Amino acid sequence: MGVIKISNLYKKNKELNVLENISITVQEGEFIAIVGPSGCGKSTLLKLIAGFEKPTTGDLEVFGHSVVGPNKQCMLVFQEHTLYPWRSVAENIALGPEIQRWAKSKRAKKVQDMLVAVGLEDFADYYPHQISGGMCQRASLARAFIMEPNILLLDEPFGALDALTRLELQEQLLRLWEGTKRSVVLITHDVEEAVFLADRILVMGSLPGRVIKEYHVDLARVRNRSGARFTELKEEILNSLIG
Ligand SMILES: Nc1ncnc2c1ncn2[C@@H]1O[C@H](COP(=O)(O)OP(=O)(O)OP(=O)(O)O)[C@@H](O)[C@H]1O
Ligand SMILES: [Mg+2]
């Protein structure tokens, strides 16, 4: 049984067929990446899984239950960080625990653990405008991971970052994920990022959005970006994207 089960899903936006006949099953602990051209419905798909939107037809289940609205199993991290500017880094990370009324001592300890995990322990009291974009994105990841969601939905989380910061954050994400073995669905424009991180890569085509190819990445982690199989897979996926 998959933790996410999407069967024959269609999504229309007014007259536009945004998604057509999508069937995807995500297993427990699996890291899935989705790549595809701009406008092919990737963000829409994540919003559907997160329960922010409803399918036009088809089935969508999370842990065996039909998705009818936002639920605690899924956390969505957006392309641009959505930290509150009036809260410090630590206070932003503590947001979910506060809402769920965790005991103060547990909250403080977990926030500290997360700060260390994403390398922001020296910036706990800084505000988002006082740190870099990459650091904000790390804080966003920490804010999502602290809640230990069973499913993490990442919509181009590193899209706005420079190449070097991207590489660093990919490794950080890998470490966070390996520590928890939650399921991840990552949207990215960056094929190398997908091959570096994912167990399985789905390639989407547009108009209407649909899954056109699927690749299993049978390489041990941490993956060597210049390895023969790595570059071969990357090339193959790029070609399937270009069509
Ligand atoms: N709120 C909306 N109202 C109407 N149409 C929308 C809305 N949101 C998205 N769309 C349409 O749905 C399609 C898919 O959009 P979506 O944002 O899911 O694409 P995407 O694959 O995430 O693109 P990108 O890679 O640029 O982020 C687009 O063609 C867009 O025009
Ligand atoms: Mg998008």
Image (cartoon, rainbow, N blue to C red):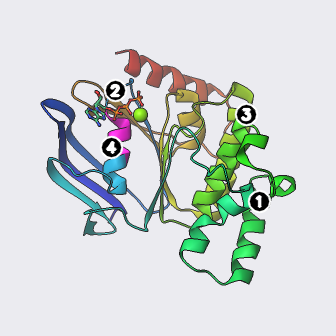
Q: Residue at (25%, 63%) from the top-left corner?
A: 68
Residue 218 as seen in the image, left or right of residue 239: right
Q: Does ligand 1 reach within 8 Å of label 4's beta carbon?
A: yes
Which amino acid type is shown beneath numbered disc 1? Answer: Leu
Residue 231 as seen in the image, left or right of residue 222: left
Q: Does ligand 1 reach within 8 Å of label 2's beta carbon?
A: yes
Q: Which residue is mark 2?
A: 39
Which amino acid type is shown beneath numbered disc 4? Answer: Leu
Q: Which residue is mark 4?
A: 45
Q: CA distance from mark 1 to mark 4?
A: 30 Å
In the picture, which quadrant includes the C terminus?
A: top left
Q: Which residue is mark 1?
A: 115
Span of residues in magenta: 41-46
Q: CA distance from mark 4 to mark 2?
A: 11 Å
Q: Judge whether residue 236 can be spotted in this image.
A: yes
Q: Is residue 211 above or below residue 97?
A: above
- Residue 44 within the segment the image draws in magenta: yes
Label 2 close to label 3 by CB (< 8 Å) = no
Circle 4: element type: helix
The residue closer to the viewer here, 210 or 212, is 210
